[in-house]
Image (cartoon, coloured by chain):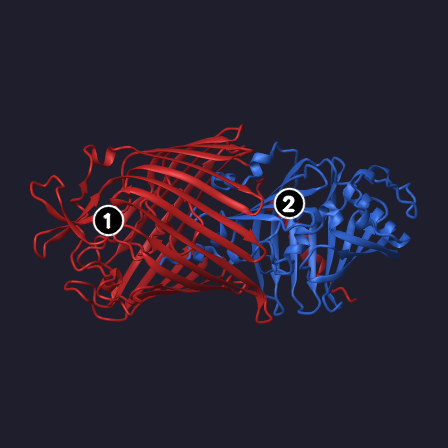
């Protein structure tokens, strides 16, 4: 018989090759405050093992940009695994809003040759209740992603090719979530700036992976606890496309997490807020909890 | 570089809401939800057979959902009843326990599920050849995607070299078929009250199945075996102009399913070898799904699908001793339209706030060009409502093709769902 496509009922997600490490955004950061450290001299000793010489570049500005980013990345080491609930509020030009709720589970990468593993389970709208997305992030290779459709009990491997596509119709694109690994970029130190009285290092980063929707991103990283506070995204025509602010930082036993990501699209006037509840760390999740066949046992 | 900040108050309240109202991901919880749908089918043509519904077929579907699990998800219970009230076709009005199971999840990666459950195997879109655990609830739709709950004991073992699943099943579920009033049926009504089972013990005869599945790089694959009562019945025809009785044979089936994922391409294939329906036969489905992202200068995605279907099973009627006292006229194997057919389809996802999707597809028989087409459009309406419009068209149906029985059954189906 002419079977209809089994994804028809939950097809949006099926076509949306979604993301992996949303949390990795917040993961560019999270350190015990090393305020005494001079902003001009970035300590890199601990980073020596994982430094990718191509990513670090060959100019002093590139080195400095990379090293500041590496220090920020390093502050997130050792979180192990985490769980958090999230709510996304999408806002269109006319001011109409739409909400999605989901839970995130993240398993820290085993080493610097791979990325984190992430499991997203959708809670609301009820239309998507139980739909799940599992991602194994890579550095320069495409991520491995599986979608679980609860109505049909189907686990489907999906393409992660759609890097510049919208994540669930929001102003976040897939690559905004998946491409925060340090060595996915080359860097350049731009200068210093101040936001809300906090001293910032300003760095530009240039995607090394394929199919990015951006020519460059400009990131503001504070000089106290080395957290990313703001990112500007420049499109393929090198025009300012979006601005992301990361606020409501809280510390969990040495690990810092932003609890509010706000993305504004300057070209369309749309915006998306992503708010997080309280994080739980070291909850006992292991590699088995991030395997594709576990998706059928989530509930 | 103007950064238009959202109002501070809005940010504050959003963050506060998030912190206050989100249940921890692992909290022990009883969750009770429900879906209620109202459906209206409209048939474009008058009926082909006496007694069938003329044009309109309204119905209502109730799907409550009760779930419980403990804090670390070691113990899980799910109860999902299903009820369709159909005001014309009494065979389509039916109750089922889609799922009613207890599951134990061990820390060491294995789990045991006891009760009625649903399991899906496979990769392809146009036909689910290897998906054999659950019986099709074919009064729901003719696409074999709605399934009845199957009683089972299911052991699943997850290791770093893959996943092994073992099933022991009993309590065979008969396939559902429309009654005399129903559309989308054969000229003769299938007598679902009087099936013929090949083996004594009937519904209690145990089924066994096992599957190994894993992924390596860009490849995902599964290999499975099944031995038990076929979910697909043959049909015995009794008397001239009499009735059709379903015949459920014991079969043994081996299957393989795989997918290769590369860039925007998904290459998929499924194949089976089955013994027990006439001569042993081979069947396969293979094809691709290619997605164009952000088409028409918008955020919409357009997926293009093509699959080829082959099925080598026996066709036609044979005289066979089914233990009824005299040789009976019976189909040599269960009917299929997918013997030598090409499926093509397109899926458009607008990726808008209402998750609007449109799916169009058709399967054409290579030999006689009989074609089954479908259109499905769906979107959310607000937070708790969704609407789906579906159409099926049977075009150019050749008298020698199974689709011929549906030649007057083109229909449009509107479904409105409220989520509670």
Letter of the chain in blue: A
Task: Determine whether, in the image, residue B167 is placed left or right of residue B355.
Answer: left
Letter of the chain in red: B
Quarter in which the N terminus of chain B is drawn? bottom right
- Which residue corresponds to mark 2? A277
Task: Determine whether, in the image, residue A80 is placed left or right of residue B322.
Answer: right
- Which residue corresponds to mark 1? B333
Report the chain holding disc 1: B
Does A169 appear above or below B28?
Answer: below
Nearest the viewer among B110 and A102 is B110
User: Picture coordinates of residue B15 (x, y %)?
Assistant: 66, 50
Tell me the residue at 33%/61% (across/down).
B39
Does B223 appear above or below B142?
Answer: above
Assess whether mark 1 and mark 2 are in contact (beta carbons under 8 angstroms).
no
Could you confirm whether marks 2 and 1 are on the same chain?
no
Nearest the viewer among A214 and A247 is A214
Q: Secondary structure at mark 2?
A: loop
Real-space Cα separation, disc 2 to disc 1, in angstroms: 57 Å
User: Picture coordinates of residue A266 (x, y %)?
Assistant: 71, 67
Report the chain holding disc 2: A
Quarter holding residue A37 = top right
């Amino acid at each position: 018989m002419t079977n209809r496509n089994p994804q028809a009922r939950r097809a949006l997600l099926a076509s949306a090759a979604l993301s992996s490490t949303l949390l990795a955004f917040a993961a560019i950061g999270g350190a015990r405050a090393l305020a005494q450290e001079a902003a001009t001299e970035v300590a890199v000793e601990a980073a020596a093992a994982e430094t990718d010489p191509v990513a670090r570049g060959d100019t002093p500005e590139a080195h400095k940009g990379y090293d500041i980013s590496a220090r920020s990345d390093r502050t997130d080491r050792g979180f192990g695994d985490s769980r958090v609930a999230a709510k996304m509020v999408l806002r269109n030009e006319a001011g109409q809003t739409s909400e999605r709720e989901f839970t995130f589970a993240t398993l820290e990468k085993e080493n610097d040759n791979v990325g984190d593993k992430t499991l997203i389970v959708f809670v609301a709208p009820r239309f998507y209740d139980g739909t799940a997305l599992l991602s194994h992030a890579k550095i320069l290779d495409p991520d491995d992603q599986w979608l679980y459709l609860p109505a049909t009990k189907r686990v489907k491997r999906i393409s992660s090719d759609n890097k510049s596509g919208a994540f669930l119709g929001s102003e976040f694109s897939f690559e905004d979530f998946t491409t925060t690994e340090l060595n996915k970029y080359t860097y350049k130190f731009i200068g210093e700036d101040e936001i809300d009285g906090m001293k910032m290092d300003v760095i530009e980063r240039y995607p090394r992976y394929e199919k990015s929707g951006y020519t460059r991103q400009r990131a503001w990283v504070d000089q106290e606890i080395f957290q990313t506070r703001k990112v500007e995204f420049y499109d393929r025509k090198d025009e300012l496309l979006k601005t992301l602010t990361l606020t409501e930082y809280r510390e969990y036993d040495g690990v810092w997490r932003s609890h509010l990501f706000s993305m504004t699209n300057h070209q369309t006037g749309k915006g998306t807020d992503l708010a997080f509840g309280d994080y739980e760390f070291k909850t006992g999740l292991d590699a088995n909890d991030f395997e594709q066949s576990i998706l059928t046992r989530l509930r | 570089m103007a950064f238009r900040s959202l109002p501070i108050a809005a940010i504050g309240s959003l963050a506060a809401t998030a912190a206050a109202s989100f249940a921890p991901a692992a909290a022990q919880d009883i969750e009770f939800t429900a879906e209620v749908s109202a459906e209206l089918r409209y048939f474009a043509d008058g009926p082909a057979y006496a007694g069938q519904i003329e044009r309109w077929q309204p119905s209502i579907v109730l799907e409550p959902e009760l779930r419980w699990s403990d804090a670390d998800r070691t113990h899980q219970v799910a109860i999902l009843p299903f009820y369709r009230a159909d005001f014309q076709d009494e065979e389509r009005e039916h109750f089922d326990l889609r799922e009613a199971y207890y599951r134990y999840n061990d820390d060491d990666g294995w789990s045991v599920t006891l009760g009625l459950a649903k399991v899906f195997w496979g990769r392809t879109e146009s036909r689910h050849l290897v998906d054999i655990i659950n019986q099709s609830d074919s009064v729901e739709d003719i696409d074999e995607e709605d399934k009845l709950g199957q009683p089972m004991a299911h052991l699943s073992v997850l290791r770093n070299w893959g996943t092994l699943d073992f099933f022991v099943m009993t309590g065979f579920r008969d396939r559902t078929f429309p009654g005399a009033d129903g559309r989308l049926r054969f000229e003769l009504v299938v007598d679902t009250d009087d099936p013929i089972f090949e083996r004594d013990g009937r519904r209690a005869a145990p089924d066994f199945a096992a599957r190994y599945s894993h992924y390596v790089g860009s490849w995902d694959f599964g290999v499975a075996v099944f031995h038990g009562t076929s979910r697909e019945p043959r049909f015995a025809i009794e008397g001239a102009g009499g009735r059709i009785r379903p015949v459920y044979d014991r079969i043994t089936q081996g299957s393989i399913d795989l997918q290769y994922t590369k860039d925007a391409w998904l290459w998929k294939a499924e194949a089976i070898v089955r013994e027990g329906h006439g001569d042993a036969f081979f069947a396969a489905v293979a094809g691709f799904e290619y997605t164009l992202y952000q088409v028409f200068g918008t955020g919409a995605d357009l997926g293009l699908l093509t699959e080829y279907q082959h099925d080598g099973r026996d066709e036609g009627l044979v005289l066979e001793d089914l233990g009824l006292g005299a040789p009976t006229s019976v189909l040599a194997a269960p009917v299929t339209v997918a013997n030598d057919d090409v499926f093509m389809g397109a899926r458009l996802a607008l990726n808008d706030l209402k998750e609007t999707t449109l799916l169009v597809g058709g399967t054409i028989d290579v030999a006689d060009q009989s074609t089954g087409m479908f259109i499905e459009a769906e979107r959310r309406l607000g937070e708790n409502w969704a609407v789906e419009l579906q159409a099926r068209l049977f075009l150019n149906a050749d008298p020698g093709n199974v689709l011929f029985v549906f030649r007057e059954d083109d229909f449009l189906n509107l479904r409105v769902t409220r989520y509670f």
